[in-house]
Amino acid sequence: MRGFLRVWQELDLTDIEKHLIVVGELSSECFACHKIGIDSKSKQCPCCGISFKYTGFRRKDQINYLRKVRQENPAMIFIDFDDFKKALNKRDAKKLLDL
């Protein structure tokens, strides 16, 4: 039997910023250009043209929904959006302190 588990792994934040689709309750957003209203099944942003490699979720993840997204795009890497935002905030704070 297979299931979804949260795994902590070091990833390149800049790469995620450039290739992330954020799925919300009603629509999705390209994190790179902030275009909203994108279909969550999209593999590419219709506005800036970047290809999506990562998916983050604003809503609480439901296993059946994750399975559906995985079937539609098996190469997509799921990330915890809250963890990503915290990592970005830490990075940005460090940049400010290093000035």
Image: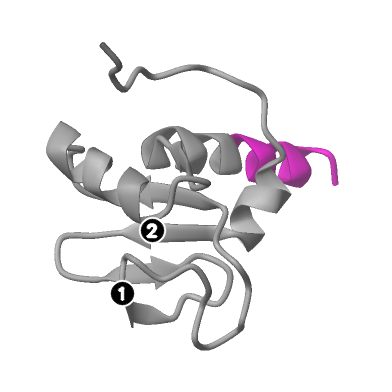
Instruction: Give the x, y percent position of residue 52.
Output: 55, 61
Is 99 above or below relative to 10? below
Q: Where is mark 2, residue-wise?
A: 22
Instruction: Give the x, y percent position of residue 1.
Output: 26, 11
What main secondary structure does the magenta stretch of the protein show?
A: helix
Is 49 above or below relative to 21? below
Instruction: Give the x, y percent position of residue 34.
Output: 47, 75
Q: Residue at x 53, y 88 (%)?
A: 47
> Callout 2 environment at 10 Å: few (<14), some (14 to 19), or many (20+)?
many
Q: Where is mark 1, residue-wise?
A: 39
Display colour scheme: one colour
**Which badge, 2 or 1, is on the more N-terminal residue?**
2
Is 45 above or below relative to 14? below
Q: Is residue 94 magenta?
A: yes
Quadrant hosting residue 5: top left
Quadrant hosting residue 60: top left
Judged from this view, the residue extending furthest toward the bottom is: 47
Q: Residue at x 62, y 50 (%)?
A: 16
Q: Secondary structure at mark 2?
A: strand
Q: CA distance from mark 2 to mark 1?
A: 10 Å
Q: Which mark is residue 8?
A: none
> Callout 1 environment at 10 Å: few (<14), some (14 to 19), or many (20+)?
some
Looking at the rendered structure, the kind of residue marked 1 is Asp
Is 19 above or below relative to 99? below
Q: Is residue 2 left or right of residue 16?
A: left
Instruction: Give the x, y percent position of residue 69.
Output: 30, 50
Q: Nearer the viewer, residue 17 or 69?
A: 69
Q: Secondary structure at mark 1?
A: loop
Looking at the rendered structure, the kind of residue marked 2 is Val
In the image, the segment drawn in magenta is 90-99
Q: Is residue 40 left or right of residue 74?
A: left
Q: Residue at x 73, y 46 (%)?
A: 96
